[in-house]
Amino acid sequence: MKEKTDIRNISVEDLQKFCSEHKLPKFRAKQVIEWLWKKRVTSFDEMTSLSKPMRDLFAEHFNINPVKLHRGERSKDGTIKYSLQLHDKLLVEGVLIPSKKRLTACVSSQVGCSLACEFCATGTMKLERNLTAAEIYDQVFILNEEAISNFGKPLSNIVFMGMGEPLLNYKALLESINIITTEKGLGMSPKRITVSTAGISKMIKKLGDDGVRFNLAISLHSANDNKRDILMPINQKINLEELRESVRYFYDKTGSRVTYEYILFKDLNDNLEDAEKLAQFAKASPCKINLIEYNTVDNLHYEKSSNKVTERFIAYLQERNIIANLRKSKGKDINAACGQLANKLK
């Protein structure tokens, strides 16, 4: 028996073609799309504007594989970490992060990760598979509903900083953002979306060629090749000069300022020589730098820099007219903070 396709993984054109082949008017495809994305139904029986024979026809040829909320855990600071179950029982994690002005969802793009960054809990997992565009969208839809339920307002921002490397799942990433930002989905402004990458230079250039309108963040963590080689093994294949060149290219194509994420590790990348190298690297294009306090991860030996060293590092950058902010991580007590996502509920 032929395995059915998830209807959300076929193109609008293919759906229209299916309707045409089965003597259904073209507008039926539009109705189905609205049920799938705007209303996010999880079965064809819920598509009540379609007749029973039509619903049966779609169910005969397609299925719907929705993401389901598996478990939620609330931090004392209000952050909520969720595990979300995919149709094949694999789990990913997403985080709802409240602040005074924003309500941000941190979402995943892959199950696990292949990049094995030294300091990251997800990096200790193997890569199971990429998420589909529909699965990425489902995370956002679910977290938006949770935001309304828990905080009385919808999401204001989305960050692709969860499990996985988004640019290694490029097609699904862009498709999901297209659905999130168009009227057939959530209608959210692309300027409220940030995609974070470990620095896949070829795909950063492709983002520029594709003229994306969302924000780009780069996990840098050191502007010294030797140190970054240790922290982020990908630097051994794509070094800082190649990364810097791709950032210039991206800026020339889009005019968008990138953000560098830089975790401060005690006695590793937090001295003034490191700050000087970072300041030099930051000249590649207009940018801002988010300095991040490290959150300890079980069985990993890294420690966070002291407050005094952190303040001195920030001051050094600011004295050189570089926009540099300290980003306080939330959800530490539930392992929901930056670098801590690694699902233990398998």
Image (cartoon, rainbow, N blue to C red):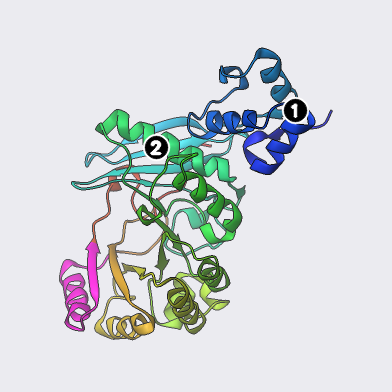
| Residue at 31% across, 64% down | 303
| Residue 53 position within the rendered picture, expressed as x and y whole percent measured from the top left | 71, 15
Q: Nearer the viewer, residue 249 or 230?
A: 249
Residue at the extreme top: 52
Queried whether the magenta region covers residue 246, the answer comes back as no
State which region is magenta: 304-326
Q: Nearer the viewer, residue 244 or 116?
A: 244
Q: Quadrant of the C terminus?
A: top right
| Residue 187 position within the rendered picture, expressed as x and y whole percent measured from the top left | 42, 43
- To which residue does mark 2 refer? 143
Judged from the image, the secondary structure of the residue bearing numbered disc 1 is helix
Queried whether the magenta region covers residue 323, the answer comes back as yes
| Residue at 41% across, 54% down | 190
| Residue 207 position within the rendered picture, expressed as x and y whole percent measured from the top left | 52, 66
Compared across the picture, whether 79 is left or right of 174 comes to left
Residue 263, image quadrant: bottom left
Residue 218, image quadrant: bottom left
Does any portion of residue 4 appear in the rendered image?
no
Disc 1 versus disc 2: nearer the observer: 1
Kind of residue sitting beneath label 2: Leu
| Residue at 47% across, 81% down | 240
**Labels 1 & 2 near each other (Cβ < 8 A):** no
Compared across the picture, whether 122 is left or right of 291 comes to right
On screen, 320 above or below 39? below
Kind of residue sitting beneath label 1: His
- To which residue does mark 1 refer? 61
